[in-house]
Amino acid sequence: MKMTKDKTLLQWAGYDRFKQDKKAFALNTVMVVAAVICMGITLGFLLETDLGTDPYTFMNVSISERIGWTLGNWQFLLNAVVFILVILITGLNVIGPGSVANMILVGYTVDITRFIIHRTFADGFFMGPVARPVTFILGLAGFLVSAATYMNSRLGQSPYDGLATIIGSRIKRVPFFITRIAYDFLAVLLGFLFGGRIRIGTVLMAVFLGPAISLVGSFMDKYIFRSGEKK
């Protein structure tokens, strides 16, 4: 492998922008960390409605409950393993500050959010006929915006998303969105095998979450993350 290739592999996501404008890079990093925390908060509320969540969270909640771990501890361990795998395969190209924030913060934020919910609201509050659908809709909207902010920051993919990108790049004859849907349904299947109950929200997110995030993200990418770029 040529030296130029080696150097490219060692440059993490966002490295060029870090060199060009450290202040803007720092502001984007803060925005990404805030978005990741918001992802965890909204996921905590979505889980309380029991109407479904994103495939990766569904899988990890199912596994963590089966083995008796907290979601934060299990998800951090799995993320760390996949994180190392992604680096070994692709170098640091898809890894950045956003990757680290996602790897560490999402699961633990979900745990903290649900702990506060259980200490603040009566048991079953979010299963009520009004609170349940309203919380699900608001939580889903918040998750979409937060995830779109995180993904379109271009500061690194989560280990789960990074592995999906690697698989998609290896299966070039199949459109990536199909590969991604199959990938997400595999996560749903694993969650089911570990005792998780599949809800309609999880199925819908497995099919439509990626396109929805891309749609929201295209707007944010144009008017927020690239608003200062020269045309």
Image (cartoon, rainbow, N blue to C red):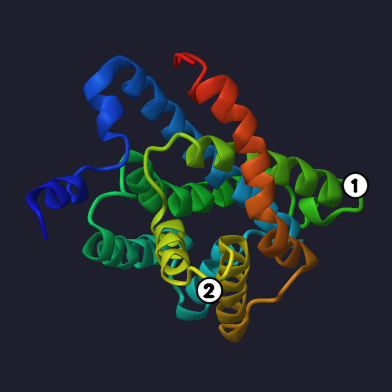
The 10 Å Cα crowd at callout 1, few under 14, some 14 to 19, many 20 or more, is: few
Lower sequence index among marks 2 and 1:
2
Where is the N terminus found, in terms of image quarters?
Answer: bottom left
Q: Residue, x 35% and y 18% (percent of image)? A: 24
- Figure check: 204 above or below 135: below
The 10 Å Cα crowd at callout 2, few under 14, some 14 to 19, many 20 or more, is: some
Closer to the camera, 106 or 32? Answer: 32
How far from the left and from the top, in percent, is residue 176? 56, 62
Q: Residue, x 52% and y 16% (percent of image)? A: 227
How far from the left and from the top, in percent, is residue 214? 62, 44
Q: Classify mark 1: helix, strand or loop.
A: loop
Closer to the camera, 72 or 179? Answer: 179
Residue 65: numbered disc: 2
Q: What residue did someone put label 1 on?
A: 130
- Figure check: 166 above or below 154: below
In this orientation, does residue 118 appear?
A: no
In this orientation, does residue 100 appear?
A: yes
Give the left or right position of residue 64, taking residue 48 as reference.
left
Q: Residue, x 60% and y 36% (percent of image)? A: 217
Amino acid type, callout 2: Glu
